[in-house]
Amino acid sequence: MSLADLLQWVEQAGCSGHVSLHRDGAVTWLNVSQREVTMLSPVRGGPGAGSPEDPTATDRLLDLFLERHGRFEFVPRVALEGGVPLHLPLRVVVMEGLRHLDEWPRLAEAYPRDAATLARTATPAPDRLSGVQRLILRFAESRLTLGEARLKLGVSRPALLRHVEEVRGMGLVEVEGTESGVDPVAQLLAQASVLVQERQFEEAAIVFGSLLASDPTDLRVRRLLREAEREQVAALYQQLQPVSVVRLVDPAALPSRKLSRTDREIAERVNDRWDVASLVLASPLREVETLRSIRRLWKMGIVDLDQAAMPG
């Protein structure tokens, strides 16, 4: 079982407890509760390491997706103490971890030398930068090498290169000896991941769709699209409630309404007896498409959702 599969299982089961990951003599643990990672084990050394303000905690968590071998132990209903507090939804952790796993080979090839020097460009820095990104700008102003920057940050090489690639994509820094261009697909995937975190699922789907249209074989895009749809399905069920009976507000007016083919397909299956979950099962469309359609029909006032009418 991969780490992504493990965290998905914990999230789907709604488990609380702690997960211990063992590999090559090292142990990392994380507490999970309410479908979130709430605490990560501390680490010795590094700026702020092990404190509530530990800037390396999220990077250390994402680095675990790069591990190829090891074992895990899950202990339910037991939380460990003394770690770094976090509040990261498990779905977001899985999405970001898979994205970084897919992008790591390209980053390793793009930045082969730790002796390469960071250099600040003349592009003004936007206000919305993370603390680590601002530190990288300071390192670039001092023309530190990648190796020196990594030691000062106290992060792994993959974590450093992730952040360098982000600020380089903004045009804020250059790296000596690397090509000036950036991977446009990686940039778009990063933008789509941000949209998913902000729950702008329709906008993220447009980005994923355009990438798949240009290259249907891209496994990175397909994997992240699958995770984004899982996130949207969970959000839709929170809005619609699976046990709510779907009723047509005005059945006589339905034939005259201008609807898309998908929405009409779902509207014509509404029989005032089936709830949301039953419609999903009866629909020939995919789960996420059916739920999107039900929500659109509900927003348009064509159907109503009646949870009290659910048969006993």
Image (cartoon, rainbow, N blue to C red):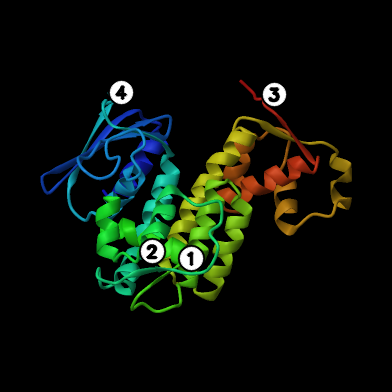
**Marks 4,1: beta carbons within 8 A:** no
The kind of residue tagged 1 is: Leu
Mark 4 or mark 1: which comes first in sequence?
A: 4
Nearest the camera: 270 or 290? Answer: 290
**Pointer 2: what residue?**
140
Mark 2 or mark 3: which comes first in sequence?
A: 2
Q: Secondary structure at mark 4?
A: loop
3D distance between C-alphas at marks 1 and 3: 58 Å
Query: Is residue 216 something one can see in this rendering?
Result: no
**Pointer 1: what residue?**
172
Q: Residue at x 45, y 46 (%)?
A: 92
Quadrant, the C terminus: top right
Mark 1 or mark 3: which comes first in sequence?
A: 1
Nearest the camera: 200 or 131? Answer: 131
Q: Secondary structure at mark 2?
A: helix
Question: Which label sits in the foreground, 1 or 2?
Answer: 2
Question: Which label sits in the foreground, 4 or 3?
Answer: 4
The kind of residue tagged 3 is: Ala
Side of 74 relative to 262 (left or right): left
**Marks 1,2: beta carbons within 8 A:** yes
Question: Which label sits in the foreground, 2 or 4?
Answer: 2
3D distance between C-alphas at marks 4 and 3: 36 Å
Nearest the camera: 166 or 299? Answer: 166
Q: Residue at x 27, y 23 (%)?
A: 78
**Pointer 3: what residue?**
309
Question: Which label sits in the foreground, 4 or 1?
Answer: 1
Tell which residue pokes out farthest to the front in this image: 142
**Pointer 4: what residue?**
77
3D distance between C-alphas at marks 1 and 2: 9 Å
Please rate how many residues cluster around mark 1, counting C-alpha atoms within 10 Å: few if below 14, some from 14 to 19, many from 20.
Answer: many
